[in-house]
Image (cartoon, rainbow, N blue to C red):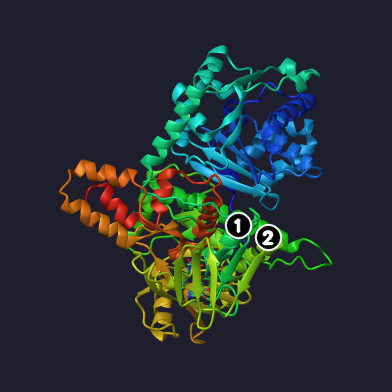
Amino acid sequence: MTAKPHISCQFKRDYPQLINLYPTCTIATQHSLDNLNRLRHQCLTALLTQPSPHLCVMGQWGLGDGIELLSFIHYWQTLAKTQNLPRLLLKVFEPNPINYYELKLLWDQSQSLILHPHLQPIANAIIEAKPARIIGCQRLIFDDGRISLDLDFGDLQTMLVNQPHCGTYPIQQWLILPHLAPQLSRKILWQMARLSADDAHFIGVELAETTQNLAKTCGFSPLTITADMLCGEQIDSIASQIVTDDILLHERKLLRQQANNHQAFTPRPSQVASTKQPIAIIGGGLASAHLMLSLAEREQSSILFCKDNDLGQGASGNRQGAIYPLLTPENDELSRFFQQAFLFSRRRIAALSLASMKGSDVASGVMPISHDFCGVLQTGHDERSQQRLDKIIQSQDWPAEIAYAVDASEANKIAKIGIDKAGFYYPLGGWVCPFEYAKAAVDKASQLANVQCHFNTEITEIERDAKGWYLLSQDQRFGPFRQLVLANGAQLTQFSASERLQISPFRGQVSHIPSQFQLSQLATVLCANGYLTPSHQGLHCLGASYVKAAEHLDFCPLEQLENLGKMQQSYPNQDWVEDIDISANSARVGVRMVTRDHFPMMGCAPDVNEIWARYEQHQINQQQAEQIRHYWQTTPAPIHDGLYILGGLGSRGLSSGPLAAECLAAQLTDEPLPLDWPTLNKLSPNRMWLRKLLKGKAL
Ligand SMILES: Cc1cc2nc3c(=O)[nH]c(=O)nc-3n(C[C@H](O)[C@H](O)[C@H](O)COP(=O)(O)OP(=O)(O)OC[C@H]3O[C@@H](n4cnc5c(N)ncnc54)[C@H](O)[C@@H]3O)c2cc1C
């Protein structure tokens, strides 16, 4: 039973404001758009004729009214039907974040799609993907990963400075929309140059001469086009000659080197995965399933080793889990990461669900995912939690699609049962069945690439020689694998190479409650001291206990009572709480791995012994604090070559897992990441040590 909030009343910007911020480019006719697309395609000829390029990355400066973007996606999709094209990643840099509701308003009111009706399905797909008005990169994936769109929203210079450079797949081409061209400062252009291929094209609509000259001083050969040129028939002769200047190229390389040195403490994979050799993964939960999917979208094969007889038997085995972003009053990196991740995960659920419905008479091959985006209603449960929630609500102007404050009567309407207190409502949140979510991801992955699952295979040891990593089970030795990912949830620290990771297991029991009486009316996920989901197949999930270093995973009657007690404390005097019947002792127990800073762990496995050895050496040498800090900042941090970590998803893995997996897949294949440097540093598994060392503190 889905709550239906009147979300439209929460948005503040109207059409005149929108069209001012996202103006129409001069290219309005279909003929001009076609010509622009052909020109952009022609400029890529050198790349497209290379033997099997895997990915083409294009940058767009400004969103405008989005028509150029829609049109190019349509062009690429059409061409891909007859030509062997690489995958496409479009990165749009836009200073003014916009959400799906406003995009629809913009497209509806401008009537631009009436002129270009063939673009409507792509516009719909973007709207359905629910981009939000948030800072940071939002990755939208279409056509099973053949087309991805990164909406990079926020301060342009900050975004560019914080983008990691991608050596294998740099930006091949820029399209500069006229209304944002004046913002192209020298500093910004150098950053664009850093992120671009040395022969990248720089195409501008009506570029001013000063901008062209500036672009030239940063090593671009700008190609400026006018509306007249695009109306004509001579477009084929326009593609420019790229003039490469050795001195300027040298400058770019220095910039890349400088940026990489500055972030050396967050290590990158030393070698790129090869599609011919599978990446080995130890796991079987949500993290590994989504890694397999993200790799498969890149045509990268993978091989899973799981100790259970099926996917989703560990922490990912619950019937229902809440999905919504973790926000902080400061809207710091953690909060921003969780908004990006939550939206990404939501898109994954929607896309996989759609895939499961495809093919009416033949089975789609993708497990349907039980879920309901019925929203999540958060309320305080004691003075402290209420203060914290108030602080979150009041400290930021949160986009309404992320969360908005509701009063007691609105809370009652949303929940359809008595809440009688004000709260914070996450309209796009809801619940999802984690093990179905994991299975659907692997189903989809196996349709896209060679994916193998070895069940009932517990890996007891891992070891490495010059050829790669080997995995040892009781009676077999698998390998060598050039890349091995540990995504083994609660057992993450079981191997000597990972035993020192700073992460702790917390047992959790989720109670299964029969749906009855008033309780059965619950229409949104309630989150206070613990959470309560709307009913699914006649049961609600009530959870979860939180027990450190538990000795067993057996059912615990006390924790069952605790779960009930939390609801009684959170919603005192509500009749429906009496409908919660725990007497059947039905529950599920799992273990989540929790980091102190609540970020997941994603990236190269740190060689902690070597970090300590170097630390001791530097301490003994009594070097100056500043020199030591510089050393740790600019020296690649020690890692176990070829070994990666994907874990520590804590109590929010349904939100954070899929994006963390997407980032690791991008790292392993050296593709552009949907996260910036500051966030990557926070996700790095070595951060607990490096954070201190970078501050010159003792370990
Ligand atoms: C009680 C509880 C309630 C939760 N509620 C929510 C919620 O409401 N919302 C939310 O977002 N998140 C929730 N979470 C967290 C979320 O479920 C986890 O973050 C997520 O499922 C972790 O996925 P994972 O793949 O990292 O780990 P897991 O799902 O535990 O997967 C790890 C896998 O590794 C396999 N494995 C381990 N060691 C080996 C080995 N040596 N060899 C072979 N295989 C091995 C295991 O069989 C297992 O399948 C909850 C977790 C718990 C425990």
Q: Is residue 612 above or below residue 67?
A: below
Question: Counting other residues with Cα less than 10 Å from the Cα at mark 2, is it few (<14), some (14-19), or many (20 or more)?
Answer: some
Local secondary structure at mark 1: helix
**Which residue is the site of mark 1?**
295
Where 550 sits versus 325, above or below? below
Residue at figure coordinates x 32%, y 44% from the top left:
633
Amino acid at dot 1: Leu
The count of marks equals 2
| Residue 323 visible in the picture | no
Residue at 73%, 67% in the rendered image = 365
Q: Identify the element where label 2 is drawn.
A: loop
Does mark 2 have its CB less than 8 Å from ligand 1? Answer: no
Q: Is residue 175 left or right of residue 691?
A: right
- Residue 132 vs residue 364: left or right? left
Q: Residue furthest right?
A: 361
Q: Residues within 10 Å of mark 1 (few under 14, many from 20)?
A: many
Q: Which sits earlier in the primary sequence, circle 2 or circle 1?
A: 1
475 or 13: nearer the viewer: 475
- The C terminus: image quadrant: bottom left
At a point 21% along the width and 41% down the height, the residue shown is: 626
**Where residue 229 appears, x then y in whole percent?**
74, 17
Residue 55: % across, % down = 64, 44
Q: Which part of the image, by quadrant, shows the N terminus?
A: bottom right
Q: Which mark is residue 449?
A: 2
Q: Which mark is residue 189?
A: none
Decide if ligand 1 comes within 8 Å of the CB at mark 1: no
Q: Are marks 2 and 1 in contact (CB under 8 Å)?
A: yes
